[in-house]
Image: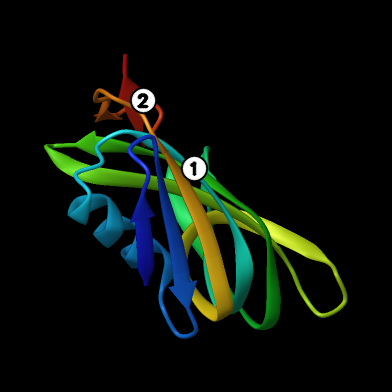
Amino acid sequence: MKTTNLKTHLIIRLEKGEEIVSSIIKACEENNIKLGILTGIGAMSHVEVGYFDTDKKEYFSNEYNGHLEILSLMGNITTKDEKLYLHPHVTFSDEENFAKGGHLNKGIISATGEIIIQIIDGRVNRFFDEEIGLNLMEL
């Protein structure tokens, strides 16, 4: 992973074999980023994406392998219980250009990943909402 901090934005280039979520968390921790917006593109060989079943209040996960193009990686960076909280979603396509997506749990870069984090001065914490079953922004 290579990074450049431009004060208002952190630019990250992920290399083949690197895991997306843990790399973004590491880069944010190294640059003391507590609040931000992330976007990205690139290519993956493996991805695990989840979806939240609102009736069961539970996450489910699906895995995909192959030549996967990241069409859009987006999300936000907040905190929960004084720790960094990354909430990323990804849309990707397969060899036939069929798109899928969901909450990004894990993604392995196959060529490169180009991620930009817009750094926001401040902090937004999250709390667990029992009724909904999710960690919501505390505003």
In this rendering, the answer to whether 118 lies above or below 16 is above
In this rendering, the answer to whether 99 lies above or below 69 is above
Camera-nearest residue between 8 and 115: 8
Judge whether residue 121 can be spotted in this image. yes
Camera-nearest residue between 43 and 100: 43
| Residue at the disc numbered 1 | 75
Q: Residues within 10 Å of mark 1 (few under 14, many from 20)?
A: some
Badge 2 amino acid? Glu
Which residue sits furthest top? 139
Residue 70: image location, x then y, percent: 66, 64
Image position of 104 (left or right of 19): right
Rounded to the nearest whole Å, what is the CA distance between mark 2 and mark 1? Answer: 23 Å
Q: Residue at x 50, y 56 (%)?
A: 115
Q: Residue at x 13, y 37 (%)?
A: 81
Q: Residue at x 25, y 41 (%)?
A: 33
Q: Return the mark for residue 84.
A: none
Q: Who comes first in sequence, dot 2 or dot 1?
A: 1
Badge 1 amino acid? Gly
Camera-nearest residue between 110 and 136: 110
Q: Return the mark for residue 131.
A: 2
Image position of 78 (left or right of 80): right
Q: Secondary structure at mark 1?
A: strand
Judge whether residue 62 can be spotted in this image. no
Camera-nearest residue between 106 and 11: 11
**Figure colour scheme:** rainbow
Image position of 114 (left or right of 129): right
Residue 53: image location, x then y, percent: 53, 45
